[in-house]
Image (tube, grey):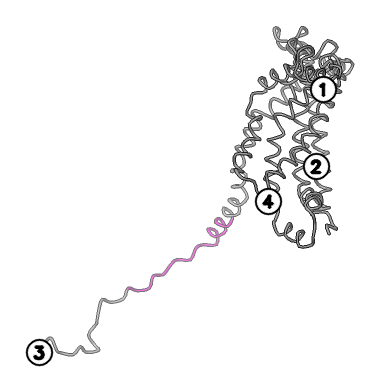
Amino acid sequence: MTASTRPTTSSEPSGPAPAPPSRRTPASPARTARRSRLARLDMRVTPYVFVSPFFLLFFLVGLFPILYTAWVSLHDWDLIRGQGDFVGLANFEFVLGSDNFYKALRNTFSIFLLSSVPQVIAAILIAYVLDANLRAKTFWRMGVLVPFIVAPVAVSLIFTKIFADQSGLVNNVLMGVGLPAIEWHSDALAAHFAIATMVNFRWTGYNALIFLAAMQAIPREIYEAAIIDGTGRMRRFLHVTVPMLRPTIIFVVITSTIGGLQIFDEPRMFDTGGQGGASRQWMTMTMYLYELGWGPQISFGRASAVAWLLFLIIIAIGILNFLITKRIAHSGGPAKGTR
């Protein structure tokens, strides 16, 4: 028998010898406890590390200016001399005792009501139309955003010509049909209406896209169930779409309120003087703040007092928003009885 055909005996190894099993040294209890503490610390700290850039940025451009404005409001502070004597609440007393402050507060809320209420209603209706099966959807959805892109100063200049007292487009149309012309710059309510029209022109399309996004998030099964139940288009809109939009409506109303309280460009450019009218009939809170800080008085302390009063009003509206949102969350869902 040759070597190539010789059978291999069981005593001969058929391959390399297997490596001996590795013996891992068990971790000590102290090391295990340390790793467990690090893991728990990582789970607790890592989320705060991720959100910390926002809070750092807010502290630099948000919280610090607010606190510094409060410090300025307690001093006799002007543009030339800088920080003066500590006067306590004297700046707040002067502002609250001024008739212009209450005129500005009245004008601000009046313009807000004349702009936000029609704006929200028109935005919901436009969003409902854009949510339908239209041709060239992208074109129409981008089209409603075009007024928002236009600069506020340009919008104000255009609408100032439209609402001019003598040769304005609106007065020419009114006189053409036999109606008397409107004194847009003399009557307070007319001026508020004209300024609110500028605000609605710029922001209605923007809010319509917000409502459109909320409408597209509504499950289509709800509409299909309503159609099967025989609900008409109008009832589906009132009893399904609008109730499902309640949180979005609250959000838009609150953001519109905050923006309305800070309105400046439109009333500032409504006439050539920029003072809010001869008797301050359309002067807003921010215009009053600007007049105190950079007007003839040049009092940063009083302007800071107005800023803080405006800040407190916004905080009050924010609390109201929280209470309304909490109540809506408990009521929840579309209105009952859609059949």
Question: Reading the chain from its start, which is encountered first: label 3 or label 4?
Answer: 3
**CB-based contact (under 8 Å), mark 3 and mark 1:** no
Q: What quarter of the picture does the C terminus occupy?
A: bottom right
Question: Residue sitting at 62 percent across and 34 percent down?
Answer: 56
| Disc 1 element | helix
Q: Mark 3 packing: few (<14 Cα in 10 Å), some, or many (20+)? A: few
Question: Reading the chain from its start, which is encountered first: label 2 or label 3?
Answer: 3
| Disc 2 element | helix
Q: CA distance from mark 2 to mark 4?
A: 23 Å
> Horizontal and vertical percent for residue 78?
73, 10
Q: Range of the magenta residues?
A: 19-36
Question: Residue sitting at 69 percent across and 25 percent down?
Answer: 65
> Horizontal and vertical percent for residue 263?
75, 24
Q: Which residue is mark 4?
A: 217
Q: Mark 4 packing: few (<14 Cα in 10 Å), some, or many (20+)? A: few
Q: Is residue 1 magenta?
A: no
Q: Which numbered tag is attached to residue 192?
A: 1
Q: Nearer the viewer, residue 258 or 225?
A: 225
Q: Nearer the viewer, residue 200 or 42?
A: 200
Q: CA distance from mark 3 to mark 4?
A: 84 Å
Which mark lies nearer to you, 3 or 4? 4
Q: CA distance from mark 3 to mark 1?
A: 115 Å
**Residue 84 placement, left or right of 5:** right
**CB-based contact (under 8 Å), mark 1 and mark 4:** no
Question: Residue sitting at 79 percent across and 31 percent down?
Answer: 314
Question: Reading the chain from its start, which is encountered first: label 1 or label 2?
Answer: 1
Q: Which numbered tag is attached to residue 2?
A: 3
* Residue type, numbered disc 1: His
Which mark lies nearer to you, 2 or 4? 4
Q: CA distance from mark 1 to mark 4?
A: 36 Å
Q: Which residue is mark 2?
A: 322
